[in-house]
């Protein structure tokens, strides 16, 4: 495949084909980060959030889990929390270093389309719910403007909004 694509596989240094490398501390640190990230998905285990390198919040379907997994595979311990309208944040969120907290957002029309497609894929596209309506999506995105965090560094809510 490498010859066909005229490219070398990622993770294989040029000129290095001398068999497997010994497993070291870095390997186990990476595996620990992946495992931590997997366990901390969707707001799980708030008592362990203080161990994270990065904390991601965002509304449903904003990409929290895929981004968390991607970063976890690069050695970062990542926890994430869905923003749910009307639910208070766990107290552990306020105990985090605000420099570690990132809020994900996206254009409401794009999020509306993603949610609508998700409902269709699940076979509930015609269900009586406002989950995928543009009005609900805009309202959810506005949550950032109403969050009163104790964070000192901020765009809207004291966390970094991306």
Image (cartoon, grey):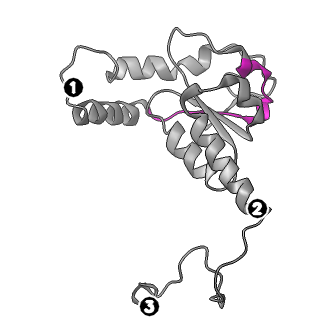
- Residue 158 in view, yes or no: no
Residue range corresponding to the magenta coloring: 92-107
Provide residue 80's location: percent of width, then percent of height: 60, 32
> In the image, which disc is placed on residue 89?
none
The foreground one among 98 and 29 is 29
Q: From the viewer's perspective, is 100 left or right of 37?
A: right
Whether residue 94 is situated above or below residue 13 in the rendered picture = above
**Residue holding disc 3:** 3
On residue 124, which mark appears? 1
The residue pinned by badge 2 equals: 26
How many marks are shown on the rendered structure? Answer: 3
Cβ atoms under marks 1 and 2 closer than 8 Å: no
Locate residue 33, reporting x and y percent.
68, 48
Q: Are there few (<14), some (14-19), or many (20+) residues within 10 Å of tag 1?
A: few
Say which label, 1 or 2, has the lower sequence index: 2
How far apart are the alpha carbons under marks 2 and 3?
Answer: 30 Å
Q: Using the numbered discs, state the Cα–Cα distance from disc 1 to disc 3 in whole angstroms.
A: 46 Å
Quarter of the image for residue 129 reads top left
Query: Quadrant of residue 99 in the image?
Result: top right
Question: Which one is earlier in the sequence, the residue at label 2 or at label 3?
Answer: 3
- The residue drawn where x is 66% and y is 54% is 31
Using the image as rendered, state which of residue 134 and residue 91 is in the foreground.
91
Q: Residue at the spot x=72%, y=14% of the render? A: 91
């Amino acid at each position: 495949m490498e010859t066909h694509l005229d490219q070398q596989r990622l993770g294989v240094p040029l000129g290095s084909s001398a068999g497997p490398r010994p497993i070291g501390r870095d390997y186990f640190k990476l595996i620990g980060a992946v495992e931590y990230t997997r366990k901390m998905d969707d707001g799980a285990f708030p008592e362990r959030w203080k161990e994270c390198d990065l904390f991601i919040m965002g509304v449903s379907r904003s990409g929290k889990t895929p981004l968390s997994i991607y970063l976890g595979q690069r050695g970062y311990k990542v926890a994430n929390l869905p923003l749910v309208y009307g639910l208070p944040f766990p107290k552990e969120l306020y105990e985090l270093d605000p420099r570690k907290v990132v809020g994900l957002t996206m254009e409401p029309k794009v999020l509306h389309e993603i949610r609508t497609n998700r409902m269709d894929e699940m076979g509930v596209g015609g269900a009586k719910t406002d989950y995928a309506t543009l009005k609900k999506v805009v309202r959810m995105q506005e949550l950032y403007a109403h969050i009163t965090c104790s964070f000192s560094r901020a765009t809207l809510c004291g966390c970094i909004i991306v």
